[in-house]
Amino acid sequence: DVARSVSRIGGQAQHPRIKEEAGRMKLDYLQFLELEVFTRFGAKLEASMVAAIDRGRLLRRLLVQERLKPHSERFHYAWLLAFNERLFDPLEQAGLKTWLADLDTWLGKTPLSMDTTREQWLEALFGYMQKSSADGSAAKMPLEGEEPLEAEDEPAS
């Protein structure tokens, strides 16, 4: 029965705020998949394309979840919101697993709920990101297992 398929039930079970943020994230991921094809042919890329590919690689890593270890709704909403608002952009992915574990711990200590406004979530996340960056818990390091991309030099004017 199509009405009872897992994907249909799963989508209906998601919190509306998670669905909204996930919709924005899906567009970024689709763009990344298209751009990633060009890198296979060794094409020279503009800086904006390199940034989009780096962002897609980050998203790919964020989507990985350990088997049989589900995360809370608040955790999913927190990282989706941080990703969509580009709060992860200054970070590199090598310390991502540790940073996400720290985020989960931090969420357990905050009063944020799924009823908290998006603006309040953003303010709290921004403060947390600044603190974790200052602590060095999200140090800049290259992606593990990924080849670095080089941007095409900007044309001289």
Image (cartoon, helix red, strand yellow):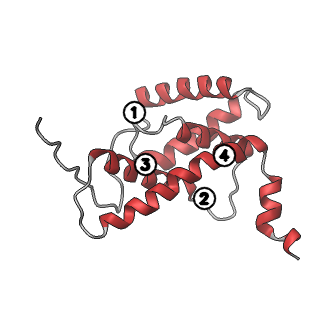
130 in relation to 98, above or below: above
The CA distance from mark 3 to mark 4 is 18 Å
Mark positioned earlier in the residue sequence (3 or 1): 3
Q: Which residue is mark 1?
A: 136
Q: Nearer the viewer, mark 2 or mark 1?
A: 2
Q: Which residue is mark 2?
A: 65
The CA distance from mark 3 to mark 1 is 20 Å
- Which secondary structure lies at badge 2? loop
The CA distance from mark 4 to mark 2 is 11 Å
Circles 3 and 4 in contact, beta carbons < 8 Å: no
Q: Amino acid at mark 4?
A: His
Mark positioned earlier in the residue sequence (4 or 2): 2
Q: Which residue is mark 4?
A: 76
Q: Nearer the viewer, mark 3 or mark 2?
A: 3
Circles 3 and 2 in contact, beta carbons < 8 Å: no
- Mark 3 crowd level (few <14, some 14–19, many ≥20, 10 Å Cα): many
Q: Quadrant of the C terminus?
A: top left
The CA distance from mark 2 to mark 1 is 23 Å
Q: Amino acid at mark 2?
A: Gln
Circles 4 and 2 in contact, beta carbons < 8 Å: no
Q: Is residue 150 left or right of residue 7?
A: left
- Which secondary structure lies at badge 1? loop
* Residue at x 44% of width, y 36% of height: 137
Q: Which residue is mark 3?
A: 55
Choose top left, top right, bottom left or bottom right for residue 13.
bottom right
Judge by depth and name the residue closer to the eye, 60 or 101: 60
48 in relation to 40, above or below: above
Q: Position of residue 87 (x, y in %)?
A: 49, 34
Q: Amino acid at mark 3?
A: Arg
The CA distance from mark 4 to mark 1 is 23 Å
Circles 4 and 1 in contact, beta carbons < 8 Å: no
- Which secondary structure lies at badge 4? helix
